[in-house]
Image: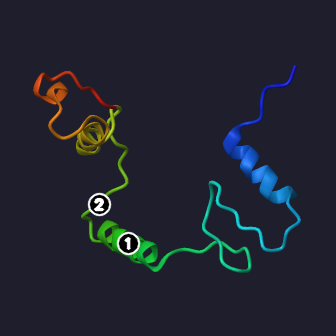
Amino acid sequence: MEAPADPILGTALAYKADKNPKKMNLGVGAYRDDNEKPFVFKVIKEVEKQLAQETFDGKLDKEYLPIDGLAQFNLESGKLVFGNNSPLFKENRVVSV
């Protein structure tokens, strides 16, 4: 018995199988230019340079995060999911890792 195809990966397979020269891949993966080469947005390149410089300057390091992740990211993710004013936060009932 074969498992059903993954819907996201199935999109990539369908794209590869399509012979239409005007097709456009809207699935998961890198943005591509007209020559099917990965396209990196200018803002991404600028942020990468900034991060590299901050690492070089000693403002950032390459240490692992704590086992439960980055606390501020966890908090903001919870707010995004449940809403900024959720009673769950006021009642201390949200835990994120």
Label 1 sits on residue? 47
**Splitting the image into 4 quarters, where does residue 5 fall?**
top right
Residue 75, image x, y percentages? 23, 39
* Residue visible at 45% across and 76% down in the picture: 45
The residue drawn where x is 29% and y is 39% is 74
Q: Quadrant of the N terminus?
A: top right
How many tags in the picture? 2
* Element type at mark 1: helix
Per the rendering, the mark at residue 31 is none
Q: Which quarter of the rendering shows the C terminus?
A: top left
User: Where does the image place residue 26, in percent across and percent down from the top left?
Assistant: 64, 60
Question: Quick one: label 2, few (<14), some, or many (20+) residues within 10 Å?
Answer: few
Q: Which mark is residue 60?
A: 2
Q: Measured along the vertical axis of the image, is residue 51 above or below residue 46? A: above
38 displayed left or right of 54: right
Residue at x-position 66% and y-position 78%: 33
Q: Amino acid at mark 1?
A: Val
Whether tag 1 and tag 2 are in contact, CB under 8 A, the answer is no
Between 25 and 65, the residue placed more toward the observer is 25
Residue 20, image x, y percentages: 85, 68
Looking at numbered disc 2 in the image, what kind of residue is underneath it?
Leu
Q: Badge 1: how crowded within 10 Å, few (<14), some, or many (20+)?
A: few
Q: Position of residue 12 (x, y in %)?
A: 74, 52
Mark 2: secondary structure:
loop
Q: Is residue 18 left or right of residue 65?
A: right
Question: Considering only order in the chain, which callout, 2 or 1, is on the residue closer to the N terminus?
Answer: 1
